[in-house]
Amino acid sequence: MALNKKQHLPAKVCATCMRPFSWRRKWQACWDNVKYCSERCRRQRFIKQRKRNS
Ligand SMILES: [Zn+2]
C-alpha cells in the first residue's frame, strides 16, 4: 500500500465568498471559530453588517 506524504487537512467553506479553503497553521488555535478564508473576506462581512449604522 502506497501512502502519500500529503496530509489530509480539514476544510471549510468561506462565509463571504463561498469558496472552500483548508486548514492553515495560523488557525490551529481557533479553527473552530474560523469562518472566512482570508482577512479580506472577514472584513467584507464586517463592513456589510455595519453599513446600516452609517
Ligand atoms: Zn472568502
Image (cartoon, rainbow, N blue to C red):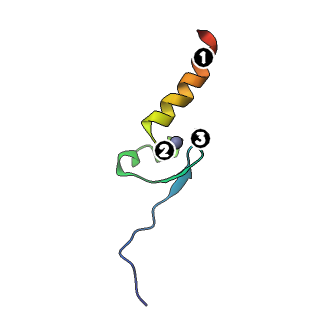
Say which amino acid is labelled 2.
Answer: Cys
- Residue 35 is situated, as x and y percent measured from the top left of the image, at 54, 41
Q: Secondary structure at mark 3?
A: loop
Tell me the quarter of the image containing the C terminus.
top right
Which label was assigned to residue 37? 2
Q: Disc 3, ligand 1: is the CB inside 8 Å?
A: yes
Q: Circle 2 sits in a helix, a strand or a loop, which is it? A: loop
Which badge, 3 or 1, comes first in the chain's sequence? 3
Q: Residue at x 40, y 68 (%)?
A: 7
Q: Residue at x 54, y 26 (%)?
A: 46
For residue 17, the mark is: none
Q: What is the three-letter code of the residue carrying label 1? A: Lys
Mark 3 — residue?
15
Give amino acid for label 3.
Ala
Q: Nearer the viewer, residue 27 or 20?
A: 20
Residue 4 is situated, as x and y percent measured from the top left of the image, at 39, 78
Residue under numbered circle 1? 51
- Tell me what residue is drawn at x 49 percent, y 29 percent: 43
**How busy is the neighbourhood of tag 1: few (under 14 within 10 Å), some, or many (20 plus)?**
few
Disc 2 and disc 3: Cα gap in Å?
8 Å
Spatial CA distance of label 3 from label 1 is 18 Å
Q: Residues within 10 Å of mark 2 (few under 14, many from 20)?
A: many
Which SS class for mark 1?
A: helix
Confirm or reject: label 2 Cβ below 8 Å from ligand 1. Answer: yes
**Gap in Å between the C-alphas at discs 1 and 2?**
22 Å
Q: Earlier in the sequence, mark 1 or mark 2?
A: 2
Image height check: is 3 above or below 30?
A: below
Residue extending furthest bottom? 1
